[in-house]
Structure formats: structure tokens, C-alpha cells
Image (cartoon, helix red, strand yellow):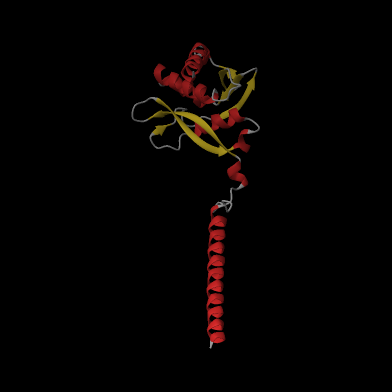
Amino acid sequence: MKTKKKTIFLILILLIIIGVVITVIIKNSKSEEKISEEFTEYTPQEEISSEQLRQTLITLYFENKDNGMLMPEARMIDSKILLNNPYNELIKLLVEGPKNESLQKLIPEGTNVNNVEIVKGIVYIDFSEEFTKVGNMGAEKENKIIESIVNTLTELTEVSGVKILINGEENLCFEDKAVNFNDIFVRKLESAT
């Protein structure tokens, strides 16, 4: 009988040991799962496309419909379109007008961009004749249009001035504005500091 009690006692101890070992193994595996969950690498739900990687932020200036003030409009565009002639692309976007419905474009309807180039920091913009409608809008509106162009282009650090041509020729109306270009540029630099 003693041997039977000893056997039962040994089996009971063995079962307890097996139970403890199984419990420890289960706890360890749960801990490892928890640790692996905490340290798993973050994978975005959507891969970033090469097009998204090429996006860059630009700022265009348009008139606010409500208060008439010049306001910036930030846009994300494909940086590839800025590689060849960023000045031309920025002016084309100004001519197209804003995306924001509370803003309005300033460049007269029907105006085309013949050419835009930079020479020694001065951006020469050659507009079609429709741009001369600016002269009929009044001095305040003319200045706002010029300020819109200058503010947009001087977002690019290499631009130190702007010269407007009409069909490839200087226009007396805009020669008088040369001083204003400089004033606008100086005001823009002062506000940036």
C-alpha cells in the first residue's frame, strides 16, 4: 500500500510539474507575441507612389473676392513640370487662376504667355496683347496684378526682378511700373524677415 501511495504521490507531483511547465510555456509564448506586436515594423496601408514622391509645394498669389487683398494659395504639383522652366509654369498657373473659390485670378481673360525666361536674376515675361487690358483696370488693380506676379516669382530664390513684355516688346505702360516692381520686391523681402 505504501508503494501505491508513493506512486500516486509521484504521479501527482509529476502532473503538477507538467502543469507548471505548460503554464510557463504558454505565458512565454504570449509574452513573445506581445513583444513581437510592439516591435513589428510599421507598414503603411498604401505604398507611396513615385508620383507622390515628386510632389512639391508652390505658392501662387491671387485676389481675395471678399476683401480685395492679395492672398497666397499653396498647391502641391509634380516637381517634374518645374524642371525645364519653373517661371513659365508658375505664370501659366497664375493665368489659369486659383483652385480656391474664395480667390479670383487677376491676369485678364484671354491672356497667353508667349515666353518666360530668366537672365541674370530678372524674369522676362512675354504676354500676349490681351495683357494690356490691365491698363484699363485702374492703378490699384494694375499694382495688384503686378504684385501677384512678382510675389509668385520671387518665391524662387534666384529671382531678383521681373520685366513684362507684350508680344516680345517693352511696353511704356509697364516701364513706369519698374519702380513698383522693386518696391514690391523690397516689401516682400521685409515681410519675410
Q: Is residue 138 visible?
A: no
Q: Residue at x 63, y 38 (%)?
A: 80
Q: Nearer the viewer, residue 18 or 39?
A: 18
The residue that appears at 46% across and 18% down in the rendered structure is 191
Q: Residue at x 56, y 62 (%)?
A: 28
Above/below status of 181 relative to 128: above
Across and down, in percent, residue 31 comes to 54, 59
Furthest residue to the left? 66
- The x, y position of residue 165, in whole percent, is 57, 20
Number of labelled discs?
A: 0
Q: Is 33 on the left or on the right of 68, as rendered?
A: right
Residue 143 x %, y %: 44, 18
Q: Within the image, what quadrant is residue 14 found in? A: bottom right
Furthest residue to the bottom? 1
Inspect this view and state whether residue 58 appears.
Answer: yes
> Foreground residue, 170 or 76?
76
Q: Residue 27: percent from the left, percent from the top?
A: 53, 64
Q: Is residue 105 above or below residue 3?
A: above
